[in-house]
Image (cartoon, helix red, strand yellow):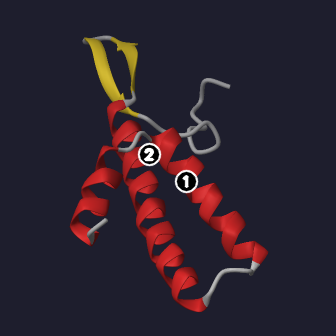
Amino acid sequence: MAAKEKDAVQDELSFEAAMERLEDIVGKLENGDVPLETAIELFQEGMKLSQLCGSKLEQVERKIETLIESENGLQRKPFAPANEDRGDDR
């Protein structure tokens, strides 16, 4: 499969499929019984998958917004992970 075709296929992968492939790659590299050229190709593919997963997570995080009531009705508040959102509402 050509590099451009492989990139296009990776862009269409779901987050779960990309993570599964990444775990498979990590397992093969940790096992250490692949030829050097193959290891380099797997490493490159793994880096692309890692970036893809990170990008998909960032997209989801941007989409997640919490709505809070205020005096002026509903306001949008950007999503913040639980450990970062420590307001006065404890």
Is 84 drawn above or below residue 82 in the view shown?
below
Mark sitting on residue 21: 1
* Amino acid residing under circle 2: Leu
| Percent position of residue 49, x then y | 45, 60
Q: Which of the two discs, 2 and 1, sits closer to the camera? A: 1
Q: Residue at x 51, y 67 (%)?
A: 46
Badges 2 and 1: C-beta atoms under 8 Å apart? Answer: no
Kindly indicate the quadrant of the structure image that contains residue 69: top left
Crowding around mark 2 (Cα neighbors within 10 Å: few <14, some 14 to 19, many 20+) is few
| Percent position of residue 45, x then y | 45, 69
Kindly indicate the quadrant of the structure image that contains residue 27: bottom right
Q: Residue furthest right?
A: 31
What residue did someone put label 2 on?
57
Q: Which SS class for mark 1?
A: helix
Horizontal placement of 46 versus 33: left or right?
A: left
Q: Residue at x 54, y 81 (%)?
A: 38
Q: Which SS class for mark 2?
A: helix
| Percent position of residue 59, x then y | 34, 43
